[in-house]
Amino acid sequence: MKLVLGIILILLPICSIAQESEESQILALKAKSNAALRAFDEELNATFLTDGILITTGAGTLISGKTELLEYIRKASGPRMYWIRTPDEIIVNPETQLAWESGTWKGFVEGSEESVVGGNYAAQWTKKSGNWLIQSELFVALPKE
């Protein structure tokens, strides 16, 4: 019994370090994705998504797949906009290779530093072939505080 307890106590910090490492990877990828969005580089941003990405926009439109997302962006009317997601929480499940991310988002018109829309978001990440990719994102536009 003491041996089992000893092994668990030794492995807990290792599991915690692995969790932090996975979280750090996701945070770094989110920063790169945000930079791609800010630069209006939709093709680069798409590299952070699974082919079957599911996105619910802040206004409730459901987009299914990278191709549909790129088409949705190309057909958007009005001024060009980008959004920035700021994570508040990331939880990784090493057994399923899935991660939960939640936080706030803000939408900006090109050339402006003041957001015109924003709210809360959640994302599901999946680790495919050793790389974390966003599998789904849900955005909810909320009144500015």
Image (spheres, helix red, strand yellow):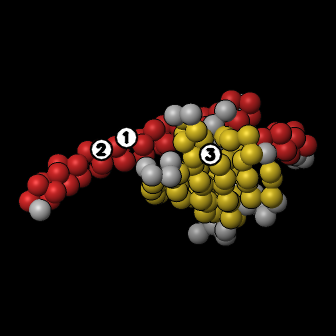
For residue 70, side relative to residue 29 (left or right) = right
The answer to which of 62 and 127 lies nearer the viewer is 127
Which residue matches tag 2? 17
Q: Secondary structure at mark 2?
A: helix
From the image, tell me which residue sits under label 1.
21
Residue nearest the observer in this picture, 9 or 90: 9
Residue at screen point 74% across, 30% down: 43
Where is residue 53? Give x, y as percent.
72, 47
Q: Residue 19: x, y in percent?
A: 37, 47
Q: CA distance from mark 2 to mark 1?
A: 6 Å
Say which amino acid is labelled 1. Answer: Ser
Count of marks, rendered view:
3
Residue 127 position in % (x across, y down):
54, 42
- Kindly state the secondary structure of the residue where label 1 is placed: helix
Instruction: Sort mark 3 into few (<14), some (14-19) or many (20+) by Cα contacts within 10 Å.
Output: many
Q: Which mark is residue 134?
A: 3
Q: Is residue 71 above or below residue 92?
A: above
Q: Is residue 19 above or below residue 40?
A: below
Residue at image coords 68%, 29%: 44
Query: In front here: 33 or 63?
Result: 63
The answer for how far apart the CA atoms under marks 1 and 3 are is 17 Å
Is 106 positioned to the left or the right of 61 in the image? Answer: left
Residue in view at x 60 percent, y 63 percent: 120
